[in-house]
Image (tube, helix red, strand yellow):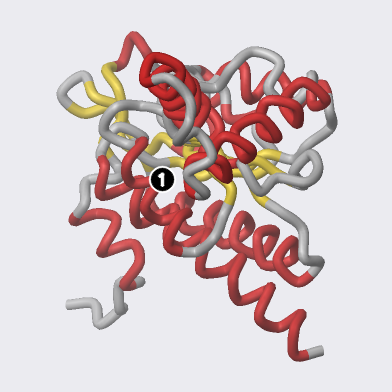
Amino acid sequence: MSNTAIDPLIQELFEKKAYIGHIKKKTHPKAKKAYIFKIENNIALIDLTKTVDYLKKAKEFAKKLGREQKEILFVGTKQNIGQIIKELCQNNNLLYINKKWLPGLLTNFDTLKKNIERLNKLIKDYNNNAWAKRPKHERLKLEKEMNKLDQLYGGIKTIDDIPAALYIVDIRKEQNAVSEAKKLNIPTIAITDTNVDPSVIDYPIPANDDFAEVVKKITEEIITSYLEGKKNAKKS
């Protein structure tokens, strides 16, 4: 009987079913070559030892960005994932998009900045009760505009410049984010399932991108490394 210890992270990812991919016919050839170890009951299964290896590289990159005081924009808009991204990022003062990636979000950065300036002004006026003397219908209209802009830009209302990297959950759903990152030469970190081409991502992390607990764990790992880098930068 072997006494070889199992990596605790592999064990945790296994228990969260991070290894379960998509059905065989949806398997991407490059994913199969890179990190799928077998097809069982018509389901592609991910080699979690490779997941941890890829994750280590992504964490090292995130830590480097932290040391350099550069920003990562976290992107995850799927219904079961968006709230996780929001909570983790809000708790750590990180940039995020969790509702919808608007086409041209980063490639039309000047427009983005104008919309965020508008949002921040509306929030400031609302908090200062600056609309008090306006008719009720005007107040309701302004509040509706504020809420709409907050849904779209609330997670990036402190953004000053184009982020140094994107962290993405589900690159099929977030194709616009991946495309804009490529156009702007922004490095990408992403959870890559068995149904996508991992070669389009700079730091792919093979895992199921539908299971909330898997996404939460991997995102926490990236955030922790990034914050460690920032902490070390402050000490030096």
Q: Nearer the viewer, residue 184 or 39?
A: 184
Q: Nearer the viewer, residue 66 or 93?
A: 93
| Residue 204 to residue 113: above or below | below
- Within 10 angstroms of label 1, few (less than 14), some, or many (20 or more) residues? many
Q: Is residue 137 left or right of residue 171?
A: left
Locate residue 46, reporting x and y percent: 36, 39
At mark 1, the secondary structure is helix
Residue at image location 27% in from the left, 17% down from the top = 23
Single out the residue that lies furthest toward the front: 133
Locate residue 227, reporting x and y percent: 59, 71
Q: Nearer the viewer, residue 126 or 148?
A: 126
Residue at image location 57% in from the left, 34% down from the top = 122
Locate residue 115, reporting x and y percent: 67, 25
Single out the residue that lies furthest toward the top: 25
Which corner quadrant holds the N terminus? Answer: bottom left
Residue at image location 60% in from the left, 41% down from the top = 156
| Residue 150 to residue 84: above or below | above
Can you identify the residue that label 1 sits on?
Answer: 85
Locate residue 153, reporting x and y percent: 56, 32
